[in-house]
Amino acid sequence: MNLFYTTETPGDFFTLNSEESKHIIRVLRMKSGDSIRFTDGKGFFYDCEITDPNPKACQLKLIKKSEGSDKRPFRLHIAIAPTKNISRFEWFLEKATEIGIDRITPIICDHSERKEIKINRLERVIIAAMKQSLKSNLPELNYANNFREFINQPFSGQKFIAYIDDGVKLELSKTYQPTKNALVLIGPEGDFSPDEVQQAINQGFQPVKLGPSRLRTETAGVVACHTINLLSLLQASSLED
Amino acid sequence: MNLFYTTETPGDFFTLNSEESKHIIRVLRMKSGDSIRFTDGKGFFYDCEITDPNPKACQLKLIKKSEGSDKRPFRLHIAIAPTKNISRFEWFLEKATEIGIDRITPIICDHSERKEIKINRLERVIIAAMKQSLKSNLPELNYANNFREFINQPFSGQKFIAYIDDGVKLELSKTYQPTKNALVLIGPEGDFSPDEVQQAINQGFQPVKLGPSRLRTETAGVVACHTINLLSLLQASSLED
């Protein structure tokens, strides 16, 4: 089953733009009466039926609106330095979206080799991953932030800075309190600078490590994302038992 | 710090082949007296010193042999269908090696779109990931196996088949007993066929899901790998507390 994304909330009857219409009618060869499921990326699915298969202005009728089941009882925000090789960063965006994340902020750090990103391209990666994994919530992708400005912003929940240093003894998995909101900072290839670590600690971020392995930036992001989700899932299911 | 891989166990004095010698002396511009760390991929590091920086036959002296700290108290074997787009499979190999895995078997399934793999290329991905994450154990990569032949092989530990089906209620994270050996089967893009699932169950594999999200093949592999490692780490550290 395909899932489509719409930035406009479908009404009882609505018309797709020419690009979407062409894709649905010419490429996917859908016909009058065929069913299409949309998501608004805000937690809802819209099951629709094609009423006029016009390849320039396909018309649809809304059959049913329903709530997605991919909403989690906590918010996860990962602020991560874009990698020098942008495909590694895109891989993180795709995997985090599949696994489950609410917000991603690219952060520019002292040791960042990449200082610029193309936000539209990254947004498309996230939309594709949401559709592919049939989710109804589109993670929010922020514009790139400077590290020092970012850590001063308020956040309601646990705040962590993950980095590689033998002095860091606490594991994220032992420090995170499942189902609480979490914000995790992940550094660039050269990791955070000592000054960045100190400033984050001053702002209430807890220094943590992500297991015994030395992970690449994008792997650290995925591992942090899965750790938070898995521990919260385990906690929720143990309460149900 | 760079880590080098050697398939031969370094003796007290040894000579590198011409390719490695050229890389170390011409590309990395290392000199007489410089230190180099090797791993044999079998759990050991070898700290050496260059005695003759010959770009065709670099000679080294062994200074110290030490055991790596990346050995885990259990064995993790993931048998996974290669993806149609092989770069996704290579991502899985790289990430699983970084996070921690002992053995990987590519399995050819009923719904596999890709039936052939280039084992040498995949082996290089694993070696690069081991070196990059400074590990001393090289995961074992098997030749591709037919699914039905593979599941008949003996395995000492818990056996799981992960797939997407609303009927699967058990979570891997609730079923896996931390620090036990584990073998996890991950299917291709079209998932396992009903007959494959039944045959695996007949062979003692437990059907499990990997959380609430619909994951791509390579994401499922990474998530399974991290789940087993994380739960075992948590168990080990709770015993230490």
Image (cartoon, coloured by chain):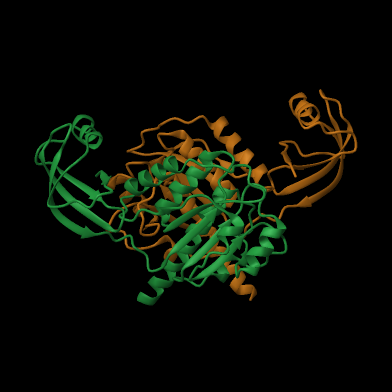
Chain colours: A green, B orange
- Residue B230 x/y as whole percent: 54, 61
Name the residue rendered at 60%, 66% in the picture: A171
| On-image quarter of the N terminus of chain A | top left
B84 lies left or right of B54: left
- Residue A231 x/y as whole percent: 47, 67
- Residue B232 x/y as whole percent: 55, 64
Name the residue rendered at 41%, 52% in the picture: A97
Name the residue rendered at 81%, 23% in the picture: B56
Question: Closer to the camera, A90 or B160?
Answer: A90
Question: Closer to the camera, A14 or A2?
Answer: A14
Q: Can residue B63 be seen in this view?
A: yes
| On-image quarter of the C terminus of chain A | bottom left
Question: Closer to the camera, A137 or B102?
Answer: A137
Residue lying at the far front in this picture: please name it: A149
Residue A106, above or below A241: above
Name the residue rendered at 34%, 63% in the picture: A71
Q: Is residue B157 visible?
A: no
Q: How many numbered circles are shown?
A: 0
Residue B131, above or below A134: above
Q: Quadrant of residue B6?
A: top right
Residue A192, above or below A5: below
Q: Quadrant of residue B18?
A: top right
Q: In which quarter of the image is residue B192?
A: top left
